[in-house]
Image (cartoon, rainbow, N blue to C red):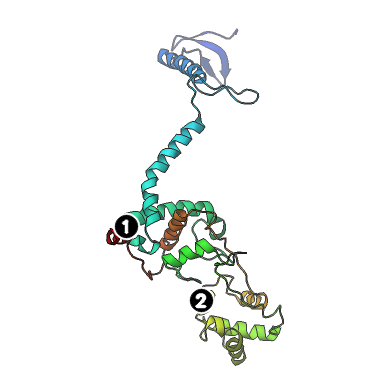
Amino acid sequence: MANKRIDKPTGTETVGHEWDGIEELNTPLPRWWLWTFYACIVFAIGYTIAYPAWPMVNSATKGMLGWTSHEQLAKEMAKADESKGAIRAALAKIPIERLPEDSELMRAAVAGGRAAFKVNCVQCHGAGAAGSKGYPNLNDDDWLWGGDLKAITYTLEHGVRQPDGEDTRFSMMPAFGADGILTSAQVSQVADHVLSLSGKAKDNAAGAQIFADNCAVCHGPNGKGMREFGAPNLTDPIWLYGGSREDVIATVTNSRYGVMPAWKDRLDPVTIKMLAAYVHSLGGGEDFVEVAEDPATEVDEQS
């Protein structure tokens, strides 16, 4: 306090603080800034009176206006659901394989499926649907059970190897090594033959014969796979459980038994239809088969 003085260049009193020759001036705040500050205080007081603000023991003050974020969210969600009602009704009516004929409805289905995928499917297939070891990549064109809209919808509805699922996709590869069907030497030989189908190893006659006797019934004589059995194509570079020699030997020895949930009892039919549209749109979707009649045409004929 004793060091206060008037700064000659500015004519302003100092506050008595000085550091390395630099002194602090007691310059008054601009009047506009002060009034703005006071207005903010008044606004804050009014806000805490009008809206929920002050924490109490078990809750908070309710506010004079009776507004709550939960109520506002409920209104906004109801409004959003109302706007989607017409789209969902149209999706419910149209057969899945005829969906691409309506480009606007298809875009809406893909958008809805993308949102549903983030909630229900990314845990296994990843955010970009690229999958990982043991979980299929949905971006490529390699499909165990079929990649058209109708096939994808069926897989979503009934799952894969879903316990107690009467209509689930089901395939069972024997554990050739663990069950003693093949010796370890034979497992190695057939693994080399399998790898040779995609150019990753040299073929051997013994492995080819073992494959013909034990594997061709599901994978086909040329290893191209059979969708009716969910048997993968062994001639391409796509490997669900890994394509190294060690991985193939482990698969032949112990078999694989991946499970996908049946979503028909967890999601409504429209959401499943949107998921199918989204998965199909990722880039690996196949052409459509067995196109159903147009519902609008059916109605016209009946009338």
Question: Hey, which quadrant is residue 35 in on the image?
Answer: top left
Q: Which mark is residue 269?
A: none
Q: Position of residue 155 (x, y in %)?
A: 50, 65
Label 1 sits on what residue type?
Answer: Ser
Say above or below: 23 vs 290: above
Locate the C terminus by quadrant. bottom left
Question: Hey, which quadrant is residue 196 in on the image?
Answer: bottom right
How many numbered marks have been drawn onto this rendered protein structure?
2
Q: Which mark is residue 103?
A: 1
Q: Residue at x 60, y 67 (%)?
A: 258
* Residue where numbered disc 2 is placed: 228
Q: Position of residue 44 (x, y in %)?
A: 49, 19
Q: Are marks 2 and 1 in contact (CB under 8 Å)?
A: no
N-terminal of the pair, mark 2 or mark 1, is: 1
279 left or right, relative to 170: left
Q: Nearer the viewer, residue 194 or 246?
A: 194
